[in-house]
Amino acid sequence: MAELVGLREAVAGLVSDGDTIALEGFTHLIPSAAAHEIIRQQKTDLTLIRMTPDLIYDQMIGMGCARKLIFSWGGNPGVGSLHRFRDAVENGWPRPLELEEHSHAGMANRYVAGASNLPFAVLRGYVGTDLPKVTSTIVPIECPFTGEELVAVPALNPDVAVIHAQQADRRGNAAIWGISGIQKEAALSAKRVIVTVEEVVEEFEPRPFQIVLPSVAVDAIAVEPGGSRPSYADGYYDRDNAFYEAWDGISRDREQFGEWMERHVLGTRDFAEYTKSIERGETLR
Amino acid sequence: MTDIATREYTTDEMMTVAAARELENGAVCFVGIGLPSEATNLARATHAPNCVLIYESGTIGAKPDVLPLSIGDGVLAEYADSVVSVPEIFNYWLQAGRVDVGFLGAAQMDRYGNINTTVIGPYASPKVRLPGAGGAPEIAASAREVVIILRQNPRSFVEDIAFVTSVGHRHGGDSRGELGYGGAGPTIVITDLGILRPDPETKELRMTALHPGTTVEEAKEATGWELKVAEKVETTDPPTREELEILRDLKARTAASRKRA
């Protein structure tokens, strides 16, 4: 059953050095507050899983939290490169980053297998591409019924999954509406689950395309209003596209990135303080 | 097309308009971000109001009123017919063969329409690390047809791509057929210079049309392999006033919405 706790306590209690962790949210509802808390607590040697690493993993990689990345698309959406990710892969800075690279379809199916407690998933894909040459977790398999050649990919079962939802109710159920991405599968595939939410409500309202992650599938719920920024939370705030564009400049240079992280993330106590600190107009420098 | 705006358009606008014309009204279309999204939304605003746009974030029948910056912007879900999970979009829709056409961009492409979006240089020590596969390999595999939109220059049109991220016509001939995919692969490539289509036998891409004002020599110079040209090269109809107005209005509204946010 989910317990309502502070985010600091949730991360300290549930995330350990060396863990395999998945912070999911497909463009929408990216758990930025939790990522910052992991950086503040200087967790290290993590294996990071995420379909689209986005800014949060760029930050974690640049701060040296990650040993390995399991992913399928590592860019700044609509803007260009993730510079810290690129620097780690191209130059090993601040430390070498092992890659396990898949396609979106492969990653999605790996989570489904993990959530289903199966050892692997099967899909039609990858064949003829160079991905199986560089990723050992893509293996041909013959269908025992039809003989069709397909591809097997192993289940993902992270030690910890972290997602951001719009709401939790008093019983600890978590509601997501709008684009729900891969969050349900990520949560159900993990050993421990942290959910940050915009707010706690008495009861959920019915909404189109809403999914509810039951309390029994969640370990910790932490209230973090705005905790997804610069990503967005449908019904609460829009995607901060200007920040995604600004990140290109902030992250391009190692020193500038380090100073920015020092000032706004390590130098703040929590996400609320971080949000105030970047609102002081220092973001774009 | 009679309503010709005389040379008051850019080569990028010509490319987007030419790509938009390829989307049939009513088609189910899996849309990549950037140029593909621009072209398919232009099609939806002009001749193809009933096309069903699918984005990999899980939105089916998306009807964005401005162009999304990312593949999962809120505007995609807001007016969608349905919003489903990522496994559902790839398994039940794409892999199951429910997608008529996939619109893809690329960093590099070879003469058979194989695409690289992974690395420039060796994989283990890349010169440039690109974002990677995303949804493209399975779109290229399973969409019934693939439309590629890509600016044509020697850096993008290369003899050997550094990494095959998504399969086109592989080594040409019937070699794609051996892979067992449901889709036919790239049927057309639209660039800022013209249009290429695969030769029916060899599957090598040939320049079959040039945009107004472009010469065969320019197209050859912009291509990193010895470009084959169809016997009879057509000239693309230039953008109509209506096409240009709608495209520019879409881009202006998009720019305004990003400033506001």
Image (spheres, grey):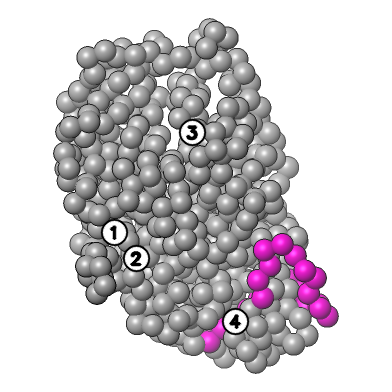
Q: CA distance from mark 1 to mark 4?
A: 32 Å
Marking on residue A126: 1
User: Quadrant of the rendered structure where residue A148 is?
Assistant: bottom left
User: Viewer-nearest of labels 4 and 2?
Assistant: 2
Say left or right for A139 vs B88.
left
Q: Are marks 4 and 2 in contact (CB under 8 Å)?
A: no
Indicate the secondary structure of the residue bearing disc 3.
loop
The crowd level at tag 2 (other Cα within 10 Å; few <14, some 14-19, many 20+) is: many
- In terms of depth relative to the viewer, which is nearer, B175 or A236? B175
In 3D space, how far apart are the residues under numbered discs 2 and 3 (Cα atoms)?
Answer: 28 Å
Question: Circle 1 sits in a helix, a strand or a loop, which is it?
Answer: loop
Q: Which residue is label 2 attached to? A: A123
Q: Are marks 2 and 1 on the same chain?
A: yes
Q: Chain of mark 3?
A: B
Secondary structure of the residue carrying numbered label 4: strand
Please state the extent of the stretch shown in magenta in the rendering: A192-212
> What is the three-letter code of the residue carrying label 1?
Tyr
Q: Which residue is mark 4?
A: A194
Residue A242 rendering spot, x and y as whole percentages: 63, 47
**Percent x, y for residue A9?**
63, 88
Tell me the residue at 37%/40% (across/down).
B146
